[in-house]
Amino acid sequence: MEQNPTKEHIHPKWLIRELRRLGVKNGSPDPRQRKIEWPTTPVCQRCNNNWMSVLDNDASSIMLPMFFSTRLVSEEVQLRLALWAAMKAVLFDSAGEAVIPRGFSQSLEIFRHPHPGMHVWIAAYHDSNPLTLAIRSIYASQSATGESDQLNGWCATFSVLRVAFQVFIPFVEGNLAPLPDFHGSVAELWPPSGKVLDWPPPYYFDCDSIKGLAARIHDNREVVKMEVTLTEAVREPPEAPDSAPAP
């Protein structure tokens, strides 16, 4: 029997500690509004204390070095990142309208990889506002009689200090049209590419340009303009490929 859910922070403790260590605020010009509000969502205790905790711990050993150094990220580690990002996307959804079918979260728990229909991308990010989130619901194309209320998919684009993720979850079968990668600055983690990821990408996003990244997946209900100005990333010779931590 599933335990009664409790309110838990979506962001892991290691990230909260790191942001506090760095003295990071939310970038608001009003000092009274600079305290970061940590989002919470109902989570069953068994999930929170078991498989979700394992994924959070895995992510800490991978992402903390990525925040500040150049490295080569192996395909195995990319899978760990994709799994963590997919889990966070599901939690963001559960904190809001909760439209994602349960099968997607169950796939994360049972198979320890994102659902085959999911897409997960990663990009570099740097801004005084370290935690951003944009959620877009993707509806079916408009018909002659008006807008459709059929929900075809859901997309979350979010930043975590120096890293940004985009998670797209389709609710119907079909192929995703080619998407702009902003001069190679967005790399797909899932489905696996079979390639080592050279981190960081050539350019990074900030709190303004990440809106363009979020807008690249849309349902044509509105005119979308993606005027994005990116900043060139500072690069050094990459370290050897990471190996994934033991589960």
Image (cartoon, rainbow, N blue to C red):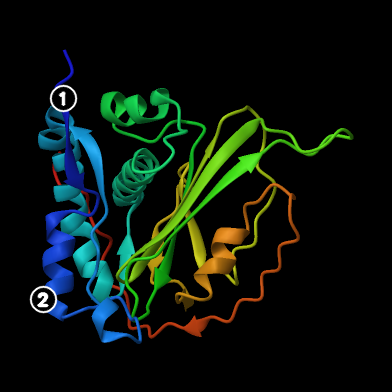
The quarter of the picture where residue 46 lies is top left
Query: Residue at the front extreme?
Result: 32
Q: Position of residue 231 (x, y in %)?
A: 49, 84
Instruction: Tell me which numbered mark, 1 or 2, is placed earlier along the sequence.
Output: 1
At a point 52% along the width and 32% down the height, the residue shown is 117
Q: What residue type is disc 1 on?
A: Asn
The quarter of the picture where residue 179 lies is bottom right
At a point 22% along the width and 73% down the height, the residue shown is 35
The quarter of the picture where residue 23 lies is bottom left
User: Which residue is at the front of the view, 194 or 58?
Assistant: 58
Are there few (<14), some (14-19), or many (20+) residues within 10 Å of tag 1?
few
Label 1 SS: loop
**Which image quarter holds the N terminus?**
top left
Q: What residue type is disc 2 on?
A: Arg
Label 2 SS: helix
User: Which residue is at the front of the view, 33 or 72?
Assistant: 33
Task: Give the answer, above or below, for where 92 lies relative to 102.
Answer: below
Q: Give residue 21's mark.
A: 2
Q: Give residue 4's mark.
A: 1
Q: For marks 1 and 2, give the CA distance.
A: 33 Å
**Which image quarter holds the C terminus?**
top left
Side of 107 where 134 appears, left or right = right
Side of 47 where 97 appears, left or right = right
Are there few (<14), some (14-19), or many (20+) residues within 10 Å of tag 2?
few
Q: Position of residue 225 (x, y in %)?
A: 71, 68
Q: Give residue 24's mark.
A: none
Q: Position of residue 197 (x, y in %)?
A: 40, 61
At a point 59% along the width and 63% down the height, the residue shown is 181
